[in-house]
Image: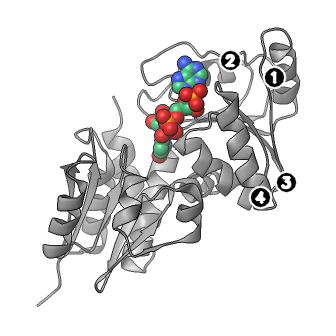
Amino acid sequence: MMQSYKYAVLGNPIEHSLSPVLHEAGYRAIGLDASYERIKVTKETLPATVQNLVEQKFNGWNVTYPLKGEIIQYLDEIDPRARLLGAVNTVKVSGKRLLGYNTDGPGLIRGLTSQGFSTKDKKVTIFGAGGAAKAVALALAETGAKVTVINRSFEKAQNLVELLLAQGYEAATLAIGQTTGNRLLTQCLAGTDIVVQATSVGLEKEKYPYPLHGLRAGTVAIDLIYNPPKTDFMIKSHLQGCEVLNGLSMLLYQGVLAWEIWLDACAPVSEMKTALYQSSIP
Ligand code: NDP
C-alpha cells in the first residue's frame, strides 16, 4: 500500500496561514498522498501537541509565531543555523528523532536569486532586529552581503550585529538619533544595493516611520510583509525608483525548502507558486 504523509503548521493565530495552500498544491502536482493542516497551538498546549503529532505518525511540521523558539526544547537535534538563531520553523520526524531547521533566511535568498538578484558582495540595509530580521541577516551575510542593521531598540540591533561579527561576517549598525539620525540614514541608504524591511510596521497599513529619501533608483527594496501586498514602505521605495518586492517569495521558498527537507526531493515550485500567488490576491 502507498504510504500517506502527514504534515501541519503550528502557531497562533493560524487561521490565515497560506502554508496549506502551497504544500497541498505541491502534493497534487506530483500525485503524493499527503495532507497538510493548520493547528492552533499556544506555548501551553505545545508539549501535548508535539506528543500527539508523534503518536499520530506525522512526518513533519512547520512552526510559526509564537513558537519558533519554544519548540526547540522538544527536539532531539537542531541544525547549526537554527541553533544560532534560537528559532526553528521546520521539524522533520526521522525515525524516533525530531530534527529542527530554519528555512526563513534561505527562503529569502532563494526568492531573490529566482528573480535574478544576487546578494554576493552587496551592501544590504535591514530595518528591524526581531526574529525575521535575524534570520534574513544571517542568510544574507552567509552569501557574502555586507549588512547594516537599523532598529528602533538600538541594543537589539547591536546584539544582532555581534552575532554576525562572531561568525566572521561583515556587519554594522547605525544609531538613528534625533539630530544626526536622518543624515546618517540618508547616507547609508544612498550606498545600499538591497534594503530589507523586516519590522512589523505595515501589517496594519501604518505609515513607514523611517525616512527613505536616501534610496537611489535601481536599489532592490523588499518588504517581508506580504499581507497587505503593498505597504507604505513599498510605495515610498517605488517612488524613489527602487525595484520593489513583497514577502510572498520568501514565504514560498521557506515552504519549498521545508518540503525538500521532508521529502528529500526537489519541490514542484511552479505549481506551488501559482497556488500561493492566486490565493494571496486580495
Ligand atoms: P518581531 O516581533 O520579532 O520583530 C518586530 C520588529 O519590528 C522589531 O525589530 C521591532 O523593533 C520592529 N518594530 C515594531 N514596531 C515598530 C515601530 N513602530 N517602529 C519601528 N520599528 C518597529 O517580528 P518578526 O521579526 O517575527 O516579524 C517581522 C515582520 O516580518 C512581520 O511583519 C512578519 O509578518 C514578517 N515575516 C515575513 C515572513 C515571510 O515569509 N515573508 C516570515 C517571517 C516574518 P523593536 O525591537 O524596537 O521592538
Label 4's element? helix
Label 3 is placed on what type of residue?
Answer: Asp
Number of numbered discs on residues:
4
Image mark for residue 166: 4
* Distance between the alpha carbons at the discs numbered 2 and 1: 9 Å
Q: Quarter of the image for the N terminus: give it.
A: bottom left
Label 2: how many Cα within 10 Å (few below 14, some 14–19, many 20+): some
Name which residue lies at 65% across and 36% down.
Answer: 156
* Distance between the alpha carbons at the discs numbered 4 and 3: 19 Å
Q: Nearer the viewer, mark 4 or mark 2?
A: 4
Circle 2 is placed at which residue position?
210
* Distance between the alpha carbons at the discs numbered 3 and 1: 20 Å
Image mark for residue 121: 3
Q: Are marks 2 and 1 in contact (CB under 8 Å)?
A: yes
Q: Earlier in the sequence, mark 3 or mark 2?
A: 3
Position in image of residue 3 (x %, y %) = 17, 84
Q: Are marks 4 and 2 in contact (CB under 8 Å)?
A: no
